[in-house]
Image: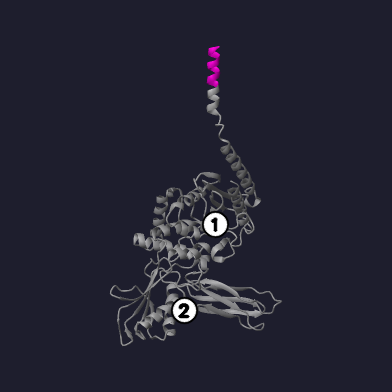
Amino acid sequence: MKQTFKTALVLLLLILLILPPLSSNQDVSANKTNSNLSTELNEILSDERLDGAIAGISVRSANSGELIYENYSETRLTPASNMKLFTAGAALETLGADYRFTTELLTDGVVKNKFLKGNLYLKGKGDPTLLKEDFDELANSLKEKGVHKIKGDLIGDNSWYEDEALSQDLSWSDEDNYYGAKVSALTASPNEDYDAGTVIVEAYPGKHPGDPVDVRLSPSSDVIEVQNRAKTVSADEDAELSITRKHGSNTILVEGEISVDATRKREWIAVWNPAEYALSLMKQALKEAGIQFKGDMALHKTPDDTTLLIEKKSMPLSELLIPFMKLSNNGHAELLVKEMGKIKKKEGSWDAGLEVMNDFLEEVGLDTDEMRLRDGSGISHVSLIKPNQLSDYLYRIQTKRWFEAFHYSLPVAGDADRFEGGTLRYRMRDTAAEQIVHAKTGSLTGVSSLSGYVEQGNGLVFSIMLNQYVEEDDIKDIEDEVAVVLATYAEEK
């Protein structure tokens, strides 16, 4: 009898060790909730638009970093502009949230009796935010220093970065588009989107059919030539207008037709030589300030024995992050890569800058041997990241001193304000994700991505990368559906 009792007791103990504790109701509930989440997400991913494609998804707790859901999360995928999440973090860590770019006016001569006898040097150090009014301000400040005439040349210096101006995987067909603009240490932007190295071209119809199209540049520059071959046609005629730039030149071609009742067509066109473009705006500013200048314009490195006359500081990096991340500005990303290389490695190149990014990611705790980084913007089709790596990164950087600036730079779902909602301002409106999902978008041919945070309940971190799909239309709807489910899940949790 005693032996039977002992045997029963041993069996009971074994059963108790195998079974979950009676106090685990919360864990059972959590597992059930996670199971429901998986069911919903798996159903979304069964969409026929993803047939033959790869949908990489990684979802974590924002508090613990614990994986809650994953699908192809350990598969290397093309991130598109989600690469900017790495670039922004590396720049904040390397340069600091208060970092400012500088632009300098220097001379190798002397100022005497309102004459500057010597050359005037405009030295760029990477500022992508220089507008026409900034060149005007430089010219006016020069006049306030007593310079009314210049007997010498106007020299532009873009030697702060190395000469390679286009990232290695940029397609030739993108180079005249604003998102493929050249990266130059001396450059200018047409407006407060700060698309450096571009000019805005506006085409307006003439008053009557047959009239030439009215073409305007903003800002105007005497180094940019417009060849206007377009005409105005009647309202009932088919009209198609193209605005492009000739390869290897600053010649802009306006061709085709525009309807007489059209408002306008506007394009941002990348210039061929950003430093020459910026220098022309400086020359124009000198003239408008009433400073007499009859010398030549040229691009050269500033000699060592020059005197600094004026220094212009940009906005801090924390503010630049708003147009950079909210509007997904490729030029800012690539320029920041070069700037990190210049400051950290004394070399303003992509190779040096990507080394800095690589070092930063390793310090964060990521295995960079498991990824491929080719640029800072994500325009490369060659870069590869695992969704689990990106979600892990977003979880880990929450403790960084600069995280608030990083987080604020992310687009906000459904927020109509352009510099709040950014590239998400028209997405997920009137859903559970509106104002709750803060995330970076990304797009290339056959690639769409969305990674960021769900600001609800205990919070979630997620990364979605859709690759190798053929159907381009409405593919982002799938990302939005996932984000809405995550927002709902976070609220219920």
Dot 2 amino acid type: Val
Q: Percent from the top left, x then y, of residue 442?
A: 54, 58
2 or 1: mark nearer the eye: 1
Q: For numbered disc 1, what is the local secondary structure?
A: strand
Residue 223 is labelled as 2
Instruction: Look at mark 1 in the image and give the residue it sits on.
Output: 438
Dot 1 amino acid type: His
Of residues 104 and 264, which is closer to you in this image?
104
Q: Which residues are magenta?
A: 1-11
Tell me: 40 left or right of 361.
Answer: right
Q: Residue lying farthest right?
A: 236
Tell me if residue 3 is in the magenta stretch: yes
Q: Residue lying farthest top?
A: 1
Residue count near mark 1 (Cα–Cα under 10 Å), binned few <14, some 14–19, many ≥20: many
Residue count near mark 2 (Cα–Cα under 10 Å), binned few <14, some 14–19, many ≥20: some
Q: Residue lying farthest left?
A: 305
**First in sequence: mark 2 vs mark 1:** 2
